[in-house]
Amino acid sequence: MPPDPLKPGELGVTRLGSPAAVAAALQQGVARHNAGQLDEAHSIYQSILRADPVHFHALQLLGAIALQKSQWDDALALLGRAIRINPAHAAVHSNIGNAYKALDRPEEAIASYDQAIRCQPDFAEAFYNRGNALTALGRTSDALQDYEAAIARKPDYAAAHCNRGLALHDLSRPEEAIACYDTAIALRPHYAQAHYNRGNALKVLRRLDEACASYDLAIRAQADFAAAYCNKSYALLLGGDLKSAWPLYEWRWQLEPLRSSQRKLGRPLWTGVEEVRGKTVLLEAEQGLGDTIQFCRYARLLADRGAQVVLEVPTALLGLLSTMAGVTQLVERGQPLPPFDYRCPLMSLPLAFGTRLDTIPFPAPYLFAHAQKKREWQEKIGLRHRLKVGVVWSGGHRPDQPAAWAINASRNVPLDVFAQGLQAVDADFFSLQKGEPAESDIRQRAQALWPRGNFYNDADTLHDFADTAALIANMDVVLTVDTSTAHVAAALGKPTWILNRYDTCWRWLLDRDDSPWYRSVTLYRQAQDLDWAPVLRRVAHDLSLRLG
């Protein structure tokens, strides 16, 4: 941020040179700074500090350059020196907050923005930045208030309107969010982030054509906007236009965490056109366990073309995927790879094979439970006259992956709601639930929630997905939220009833209760966000029909 206008005598007495010479140097430094010549400005400010080590403006501006260069610790050191000289300078407090925010220290950032606002109550940028720090802490309602305070002080603050929209979106108020983005775009017509956010809100509202148009405007404003390409692909997938979606989905490799996880394997990517007969192709599991289960089916298509297929997967899937046809060698992720000619990430295979809704391969069973493990569970369960229902109500807690947890929070069913919705069903329920805190929760509360004693929890004996598959093979129905167990059950061909959140994942499409990916899937969709009770009433009714 440029310094405040200098006043006569403000520079004070310098150790070397005259105040006039220092003032001239400062003005020259600011001119270079404003022209984007950061290194030249940095040298000038340093020369001023050599003349006067407590020169406030030189420290302030050196701190600003450090922020511009993402040198967060240097920025804190320089701005800390500046604020000790002038403790009431709002802009320096705000910039200290920006450095703390960049270092993922939002509580300290908020304290600095508080100081900035105390020094300058009309400081719109400090309210805006404090809102961003509050957002990072998940305090969305508080952040919304700060964005509104910023707008009240600066009505043409496009970024504040945009982030107010984000807060409203996170609070499940997408229509209001769109109005905010519209205001931001009216102020800045080529505001790529606002167009992108608008597309996301429209996608939630299932206005897919409009969402795609907004993503296109974001891309027009910023040609390398990888997230806009990806989210447009999700909108197209939701609408069933797989052919148009898959090329755009390749932009995922420009986004974290995939961008950082790419490996240099020294072999070309297989794109679907290269001849693979007699060649070895490495298929890489790139994302979640459920994604790996869903897309490993393509290995067989490569085998049908005459390829030797090496499939690299996480440890938890080794046992289960050993039952799959078409794989020459299964490799645990992290272990040495055999020689290969081509490589292809699993989720690039639909593009390579030109997959459309009517050409999705192998919706019938393509995975199988191990016979011995299946028999062991059969003996343990014994003969039962009631319907056997395997259940999963939570996708697990992932504190190290806030974006994933944000999705889980909407797709998980609270245990009390889940149990209450099924209590009247005269069936035997078997927990397939893995992951904390859900496993601990059910161990403590199963008897209270299922007082009839028809809930069975041996999930602690399920050590990998081969164990889970063996138990699933002994069920009549699997009832699950949209998590990896849903893919296991569906790939086995077991009747799989998925409790599907309103803001559905792209793979389940819109407005249908079946899935072209798995013939055995039935989707029970929320009619509105976060309301699971009506969904479970439909499930209970349909389970009761199966009992008859």
Image (tube, helix red, strand yellow):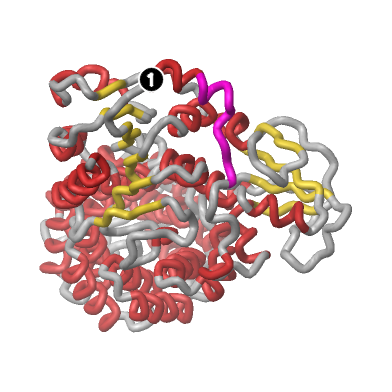
**524 left or right, relative to 336:** left
The relative height of residue 218 versus residue 363 in the rendered view (above or below) is below
Q: Nearer the viewer, residue 96 or 12?
A: 96
User: Element under label 1?
Assistant: helix
Q: In percent of the image, x 21 and y 66: which residue is there?
A: 174
Viewer-closest of 514 and 139: 514
Judge left or right: residue 533 versus residue 105: left
Residue 261 at x, y = what percent? Answer: 61, 45
Q: Is residue 370 magenta?
A: yes
**Residue at 32% across / 69% down in the picture?**
203
> Residue 472 colored magenta?
no
Q: Is residue 190 above or below residue 458?
A: below
- The magenta stretch is 366-375
- Residue at 65% across / 34% down in the picture? 322
The residue to which callout 1 is attached is 381
Instruction: Estimate the x, y position of residue 185 in percent, counting from the top left.
Output: 29, 79
**Residue 421 percent location from the top left of the image:** 15, 40
Residue 121 vertical position relative to residue 426 in the rendered view, above or below: below
Q: How many labels were placed on the picture?
A: 1
Q: Which one is in front, 65 or 231?
A: 231
Residue occupying the point 33% across, 60% down: 513
Closer-to-camera residue (176/331) = 331
Amino acid type of the residue that numbered disc 1 sits on in the rendered structure: Ile
User: Would residue 140 be seen by someone viewing this image from the given angle?
Assistant: no
